[in-house]
Amino acid sequence: QTCARKTAGTVLCWGGNYAGVLGQGYIKDEMLKAPGLVKELPDVAQIALGSMNTCALKKDGTVACWGFNDKGQLGDGTKESKSVPTVVLGLLDIAQIAIGYKHTCTLKTDGTVACWGLNDHGQLGDSTKIDKSKPTMVPGLSDVVEIALGSDHTCALKNTGAVTCWGRNDYGQLGVDTTKASKSSPIPFFDVKASSAPASPTSSSAKPEETTIIVTPAA
């Protein structure tokens, strides 16, 4: 699927509609060749796309998700797929949203992080490997300014320039020691020394087994 956010705050999606991932109000798996307006979704500030699910951060700081939900990746407390945006339970004051293969994380304005969905590699950061269908806070993690998700791992950039990651590590994607063991809680691995000023980060997930965090000096 592909989606775009218009400057007016509405969202358009097109492509394959498996499990209702295009947000058109029906589950039927068919191709939508022209952009279709996502139902019941105004005032969107950011969108994020997963393997077969989509989430939107609204301007009021709430989050809605739709599409495939076999691992609880929509965050509504169920494992039922949804063809229209469904509010994620208990989320307020969200500043950023990011999606991996089948897990989702949000950054709150207070610098804390909550994740939900698939957790087979500990990618939710809650010290377990149990899937969650509702947002779960990452314990002990604060002062975060940016998050980035790979396929099955998660990273966070803190306001000090420190980076911490958790989840799958078979390719060394967490940047810690020489083992390939997954980590189910945040593991710090380096400090970004871009400048003496606070960093203003942007991030992107490259290949599924990689995470790229680009830090530029703040003005």
Image (cartoon, grey):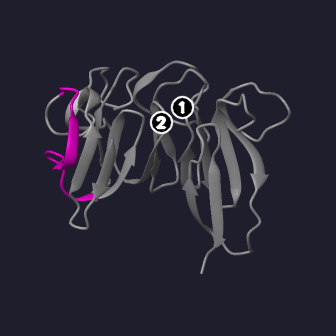
Q: Is residue 113 visible?
A: yes
Q: In this view, does 217 lie to the left or right of 90?
A: right
Residue annotated with mark 2? 115
Residue 27 spot, x, y in % from top left: 19, 27
Query: Which residue is at 72% across, 28% downward?
Result: 170
Residue type, label 2: Cys
Mark sitting earlier along the chain (1/2) = 2
Tell me the quarter of the picture where residue 203 sits: bottom right
Which residues are drawn in magenta? Answer: 27-44
Residue annotated with mark 1? 124
Residue 67 spot, x, y in % from top left: 29, 32
Tell me the quarter of the picture where residue 128 sits: top right
Let me know if residue 36 is in the magenta part: yes
Residue type, label 1: Leu
Q: In this view, does 112 lie above or below 44?
A: above
Q: Nearer the viewer, residue 16 or 148?
A: 16
Q: What element carries label 2?
A: strand
Tell me the quarter of the picture where residue 192 sits: bottom right
Query: Which residue is at 33% across, 47% downward?
Result: 2
